Image: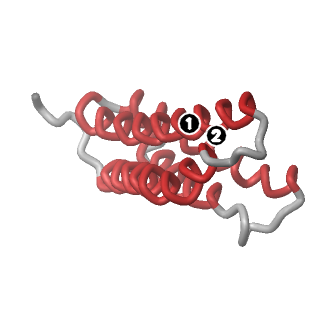
């Protein structure tokens, strides 16, 4: 397999994507997913849906990193896919602060995806 698309910004975007995936899986597993499963005060449907969403986020974060790695091998289309995913998560995360009326100190996660989206865009646009 020949690397067709070598780019430092894609490599960093991939590393950050996998780092946030691991942080989400291990840190979030202990502080969010486990207590969520044990929250007997929540309606079972609400708890089960939120728990499943937590797992879907884990898979999405992993897939975002995979897209950037695939971009290193097969080109820009995969970088664009990873970049769009990171940008969508950033916008949703930053918008959630306003929708929920909380602070970025509480809901900071959207900011984690801004550098990934910027690095991906930098690479995909050939800047």
**Location of residue 62 with respect to 33 vertically, above or below:** above
| Quarter of the rendering containing residue 71 | top left
**Location of residue 105 with respect to 47 vertically, above or below:** below
| Quarter of the rendering containing residue 51 | top right
Q: Are marks 2 and 1 in contact (CB under 8 Å)?
A: yes
Residue, x 69% and y 50% (percent of image)?
93
Where disc 1 sits, the SS reads helix
Where disc 2 sits, the SS reads helix
Q: As rendered, which of 69 and 110 lies closer to the eye?
A: 110
Residue, x 78% and y 35% (percent of image)?
43
What numbered label is drawn on residue 104?
A: none
Q: Which residue is mark 1?
A: 84
* Tally of marks: 2
Is 119 on the left-hand or right-hand side of 106?
Answer: left
Q: Residue furthest left?
A: 1
Q: As rendered, which of 37 and 81 lies closer to the eye?
A: 37
Q: How is the image coloured?
A: secondary structure
**Location of residue 79 with respect to 123 vertically, above or below:** above
| Quarter of the rendering containing residue 4 | top left
Q: Position of residue 53 (x, y in %)?
A: 61, 35
Residue, x 46% and y 46% (percent of image)?
120
Is 83 on the left-hand or right-hand side of 67?
Answer: right
Is 3 on the left-hand or right-hand side of 85?
Answer: left
Q: Which residue is mark 2?
A: 88
For the N terminus, the quadrant is: top left
Characterize the local packing of mark 2: few (<14), some (14-19) or many (20 or more) Cα atoms within 10 angstroms.
some
Q: Position of residue 49 (x, y in %)?
A: 67, 31
Characterize the local packing of mark 1: few (<14), some (14-19) or many (20 or more) Cα atoms within 10 angstroms.
some
Q: CA distance from mark 2 to mark 1?
A: 6 Å
Q: Position of residue 94 (x, y in %)?
A: 73, 54
């Amino acid at each position: 397999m020949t690397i067709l698309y070598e780019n430092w910004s894609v490599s960093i975007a991939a590393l950050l994507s996998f780092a946030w995936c691991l942080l989400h899986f291990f840190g979030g597993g202990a502080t969010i997913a486990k207590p969520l499963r044990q929250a007997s005060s929540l309606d079972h449907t609400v708890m089960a849906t939120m728990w499943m969403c937590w797992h879907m986020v884990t898979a999405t974060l992993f897939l975002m990193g995979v897209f950037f790695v695939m971009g290193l091998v097969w080109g820009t289309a995969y970088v664009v896919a990873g970049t769009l995913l990171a940008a969508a998560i950033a916008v949703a995360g930053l918008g959630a602060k306003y929708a929920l009326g909380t602070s970025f100190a509480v809901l900071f996660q959207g900011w984690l995806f801004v550098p990934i989206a910027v690095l991906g865009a930098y690479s995909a646009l050939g800047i």
